[in-house]
Amino acid sequence: MSKPTLWRTPTRLSRRLIAAKQPYRCLSCSFRLAQEQAKQDAKTTHFGFENVPESEKESRVGAVFSSVASSYDTMNDLMSLYIHRLWKDRFVRSLNPGLHPTTATTTSSSSPPQPQTLLDIAGGTGDIAFRLLSHATDINNDTMSRVIVSDINPAMLSEGKKRSLETPWAGSERLSWVEANAERLSMLDDASIDLYTVAFGIRNFTNKQAALEEAFRVLKPGGIFACLEFSKVGNRLLNGVYKRWSFGAIPLIGQLVAGDRESYQYLVESIEKFPSQREFVGMIEQAGFMVPEPAWEDLTGGIAAIHRGFKPV
């Protein structure tokens, strides 16, 4: 008696083998993945007064700063009537960067003081970095501490490098430049930075809380987070004048001087959307920092403000 034969023909056998190799498809899993992707795509943030997908903001902000890079310093002078220079000077003086003489003299000769590493975020044009190095050198006689300038925009970094050629720091190992996203500073180790500064940049970040948490990660215990940013004006009369200047004059100046009204319209709208002083303090504390008293320092009635946070030891 012959044995029964199943799938005797080569064609049937090949079909059976091919069917067996087909991967298992979980329709419910695919549906869940599609839902998660849809949620991710649906996340929005503000680009000025416009709501845009989070995935788009970085490129749109990048386009703005690529457009304004060559005229950025001139426009800052015109938009603030040169007051931004005084704000930046005050910001750096309040931080007193560099190895302080009192600290250096009390350190034993067997273990000399270690140079500080300062990180200036969104500092493409070098305005803050040059001030930090000058203060450390001229006020604290510190010729060792160094500054890393980080910016997400290559055009802004290019402008800063050009400007550095006119400073004592051209070609110096004390000044370096890196293109990076402040929300993901993968090139920096944990607890590697003594002072983290960001001036007029954090309002443009897609995820400000993520950037604050990344600042906390890279700072050493006892390290300082310091931010100079446009804020909220407390005086009603001054606020009215300031709003008229911001929304009426600044875009017009951008059009006449830089040939770019839209970029400067975005910049004034981004100022309006930035959290209040008290709200921003809450964000700094949420990232893990200790906030000193007073919690912030208003400049020119609150048009700008200085915020600081200390990483606990």
Image (spheres, grey):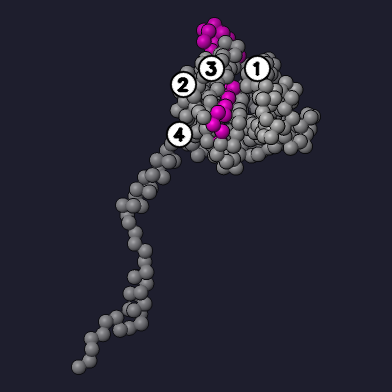
Task: Residue 147 in the image: state x and y as whole percent.
Answer: 68, 32
Left or right: 144, with 6 as reference point = right
| Outermost residue toward the left in this view | 1
Residue 44 is labelled as 4
Quick check: 15 above or below 296?
Answer: below
Q: Which residue sits at x=55%, y=21%?
A: 307
Residue 98 appears in view: no
Q: Sequence order check: which comes first, mark 2 or mark 4? A: 4
Q: Estimate the spatial distance between the alpha carbons at disc 4 and disc 1, rounded to whole Å.
A: 35 Å
Residue 296 is labelled as 3
Circle 1 residue: 90
Magenta segment range? 218-245
Q: Quadrant of residue 39?
A: top left
Q: Amino acid at mark 2?
A: Glu
Q: Amino acid at mark 4?
A: Thr
Q: Sequence order check: which comes first, mark 2 or mark 3? A: 2
Circle 2 residue: 279
Local secondary structure at mark 3: strand
